[in-house]
Image (cartoon, rainbow, N blue to C red):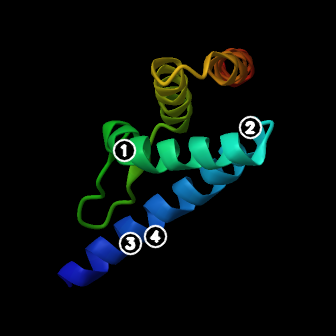
């Protein structure tokens, strides 16, 4: 029974992560920056996901705040790009974050 719980959680997380990877891939203007952002996304996703999701209880579905997760991922990607000296990429990510905040609210 325990394996079912973890399998369900893993499938739910994958259903969130893969579409977000596709979105992240469209942000970068070059293949090199796309690779950079996807690597950084793989690094920040676990913390952002766990912060904005709640595990399912018995007979309950997991809950997830997709808007806060989306913003948290973009903010972390922008911070990382700034810290790595990729200022134009950081600005691009921040622009996407601002637009998405406006659209999602």
Q: Mark 4 or mark 2: which is in front?
A: 2
Q: Is 84 situated above or below 24? A: above
Tell me which corner region of the image, top left, top right, bottom left or bottom right, holds residue 51: top left
Q: How dense is the environment of label 1, judged by Cα within 10 Å: few (below 14), some, or many (20 and up)? A: some
Of pointers 4 and 1, the one earlier in the residue sequence: 4
- Residue that extends furthest to the left in the rendered view of this protein: 2
Left or right: 95 with respect to 43?
right
Q: Is 71 situated above or below 45? A: above
Do the numbered discs 3 and 4 sit on residues whose CB atoms are within 8 Å?
yes
Q: Mark 3 or mark 2: which is in front?
A: 2
Mark 2 to mark 1 CA distance (whole Å): 27 Å
Mark 4 to mark 2 CA distance (whole Å): 27 Å
Residue displayed at 80% across by 36% down: 29
List the residue tagged with mark 2. Answer: 28
Mark 4 to mark 1 CA distance (whole Å): 13 Å
Left or right: 7 with respect to 64?
left
Of pointers 3 and 2, the one earlier in the residue sequence: 3
Q: How dense is the environment of label 4, judged by Cα within 10 Å: few (below 14), some, or many (20 and up)? A: few
Do the numbered discs 3 and 2 sit on residues whose CB atoms are within 8 Å?
no
- Of the numbered discs in the image, which one, if any, rests on residue 11? 4
Q: Mark 2 or mark 1: which is in front?
A: 2
List the residue tagged with mark 1. Answer: 53
| Total labels drawn | 4
Do the numbered discs 1 and 3 sit on residues whose CB atoms are within 8 Å?
no
């Amino acid at each position: 029974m325990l394996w079912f719980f973890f399998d369900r959680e893993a499938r739910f997380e994958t259903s969130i992560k893969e579409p977000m990877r596709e979105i992240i891939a469209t942000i970068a203007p070059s293949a090199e920056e796309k690779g950079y952002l996807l690597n950084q996304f793989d690094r920040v996703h676990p913390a952002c996901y766990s912060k904005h999701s709640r595990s399912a209880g018995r007979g309950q579905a997991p809950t997830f705040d997709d808007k806060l997760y989306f913003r948290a991922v973009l903010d972390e990607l922008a911070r990382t790009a700034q810290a790595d000296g990729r200022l134009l990429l950081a600005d691009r990510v921040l622009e996407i974050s601002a637009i998405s905040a406006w659209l999602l609210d």
